[in-house]
Image (tube, grey):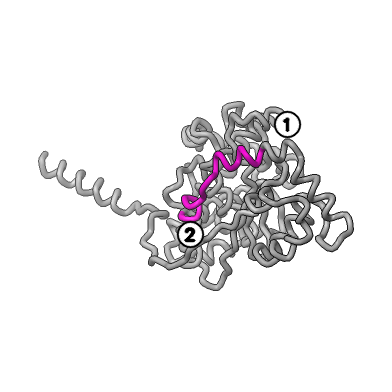
Amino acid sequence: MKCRLLIITVLIFLSGACRKDPYHLSIPETSLHISIKRLEVDLFALDPDSIMEKVPVFHDKYGAFFDLFNYQIINIGGTGQVTYPQYLTLFLTDYLNNEVSRKTMELYPDLSWLEEQLSDAFGRYKYYFPEKQIPAVYTFISGFNQSIVIGDSILAIGLDKYLGTDCYYYKRLGLQKYMIKNMFKDKIVTDCISAWCSTEFIYNDSVDNILSNMIYQGKIWYLTKSLLPDQPDYLVTGFSPEELDFCRKNEGRMWEYLVEHKILFMSDRLTIQKFAGNGPFTKDFGTKSPAKASSWIGWRIVENYAARNHSITMKELMNEDDFQKILSLSRYNP
């Protein structure tokens, strides 16, 4: 009897030893350091009467991001336009913008914590993709226009979209709860990395259907978690802890529903939006489910695929656009 017990114990130990954490891998340390340039600090310290005098200074310090900010974020046109000083003055002297600027500085007087997290994440990114560029990182205030903006080698963060879920301004804007739930400090770094990964590895499939969308998003979350292994899953996905718990407890049921109702290969836009788009919940899975619950299954499929195909590199995984192949080789069966 003791012998049988010993054998069973050893087998359990060995089976546990084989299940390696796919995210906390030993990565060589790098000297990479992300230094964040804060446009909102410089802009709101500016004397409106000296705008045109300071434009060359802003161009020199912020480069292409300054043009991106003017043209695409606050939409006031280029610095060479006659109306530019007037429009920028209106933006900088607006009462609400100044109020939000003060609130932002109260919450984010220092961003060294974010620089540290982004430096670690992009150090890992450089390890997996040595040929890719590391973005210059900026922050801004836009009148609640943008959260994360990605440009050519640019990653910019709209800090006024991360003032906290209890922020008065968000309720005043009439935003629904599901829109506000991720507008807080701890969500910034995962939003940055997820957005950057989404633009570096663009969704590409000849057949646009539910399966392709859910596995693509699963790949993005898998890479985000790999670059930020210490971030909890609810921050990676944007689900609440309760919503994540729902997914874990109902994984088999959700998968069974998708298969039995032949939803995986549906390609009409309304169905794709229902399962892959934003919202308060996924209607077919119940009101306690999160929106994009099917994408969480996509993440699980990608994890299984990576675990069963050890020779696949991160680069090969992210460049693999045959989503049916990923499903087949994952042998996913919750």
| Residue 260 x/y as whole percent | 61, 37
Magenta stretch in the rendered image:
100-116
**Of 266 and 91, the residue lying toward us:** 91
Q: Amino acid at mark 2?
A: Ser
Q: Identify which residue is drawn at 48% across, 45% down.
A: 333
Q: Identify which residue is drawn at 76% across, 44% down.
A: 269
| Residue 76 x/y as whole percent | 82, 52
Does the magenta segment cover residue 321? no
Q: Amino acid at mark 1?
A: Leu
**Of 236 and 259, the residue lying toward us:** 236
**Of 212 and 43, the residue lying toward us:** 43
Residue 304 visible within the image: no
Vertical placement of residue 37 versus 282, above or below? below
Q: Which residue bears the numbered disc 1?
A: 173
Residue 333 visible within the image: yes
Q: Identify which residue is drawn at 65% across, 53% down.
A: 42
Q: Secondary structure at mark 2?
A: helix
Q: Which residue bears the numbered disc 2?
A: 119
Q: Residues within 10 Å of mark 1 (few under 14, many from 20)?
A: few
